Amino acid sequence: MAEDFEHAADVVRQYDKDRYLSALLAPEDHRPGLMALYAFNAEIARIREIVSEPLPGEVRLQWWRDFLEGTSHGAVGANPVASALAQTIDRYKLPKNGLIAMTEARIFDLYNDPMPNLNDLEGYTGETVSGLFQLACWVLNNGEDPGTATVAGHAGVAYGVTGLMRALPWHASRQQMYLPKDVLDRHGVDLLTVFKGEATPELAAALSEMRAHARHHMSRVKQAASDVPDTCRAAFLPLSLVEPFLKKMEAANFNPLKDVAELSQLRRQWILWRASGKLVASL
């Protein structure tokens, strides 16, 4: 079954390079499990990109839910990511409810409904990103509850919100909005203007508030860092990229609807490598 895990690693390398690099810095014995978990996340996160309308996307998500719930729906062996994930679930006794919640939250991605408010956004990032941090800790803690639910919760919001702001040009081009409506309304943001690709002072103010929100959750990660076992450190390495991305977005000539906050591959590798030698509290 090594081929299944090799395929999973290829998926992560192609679609989630930051987590791929962070997994390479994890203990070798647990890398296959991390790759299987991250590949599953990559597969459900990109469904919107490979379907032409929501219904086929919901069918794909239902397939994953059926697989996780043990419903018979065809040979899992035909899907190497599912096969690798099944082996990882068995080895580490991963709680399936967290994986199922990840698939259910991804239904939102298939539609262009607005994100109602900040609490809803935190719920979305909690189920999609925080859940992934927590399950990665479960793998790195060799199948035992790592006691990291609180820090994973804050980590997911910080990393998830930062990622959604980075993806704003892409989402806005297809008239999809993850920034919460209550924040946009508070700053007088006109969605039609955003969807036309026109950056405004109102949008800049809303994004400034969202960056502050991401940093608030990063500060909560640091406050809870003592709860993180040393064995789980690699799960949180992607957080070391949050502040560099936020600073990129704050550059004077940065257009949030045209530019994507990006770091060179070399700089990303260096930041992750440097963070791997430090405690989570220093991220």
Image (cartoon, rainbow, N blue to C red):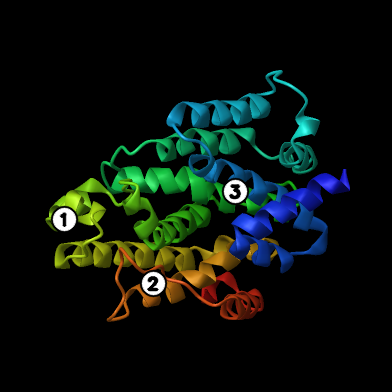
Mark 3 belongs to which amino acid? Ala
Left or right relative to 84: residue 127: left
Q: Which residue is mark 3?
A: 42
**What number is the disc on residue 189?**
1
Mark 2 belongs to which amino acid? Leu
Judging depth in this view, the residue of 46 and 281 nearest the camera is 46
Task: Assign a secondary structure to mark 3.
Answer: helix
Task: Assign a secondary structure to mark 1.
Answer: loop
Residue sitting at x 62%, y 31%: 64
Q: Position of residue 40 (x, y in %)?
A: 64, 44
**What number is the disc on residue 246?**
2
Task: Assign a secondary structure to mark 2.
Answer: helix
Residue 212, above or below 153:
below
Left or right relative to 229: residue 159: left
Q: Position of residue 137 (x, y in %)?
A: 64, 54
Judging depth in this view, the residue of 184 and 200 nearest the camera is 200
Where residue 267 sits, quadrant-wise, is bottom right
Judging depth in this view, the residue of 80 and 91 nearest the camera is 80
Mark 1 belongs to which amino acid? Val
Residue sitting at x 51%, y 50%: 130
**Do the numbered discs 3 and 2 sit on residues whose CB atoms are within 8 Å?**
no
- Reading the chain from its start, which is encountered first: label 1 or label 3? 3
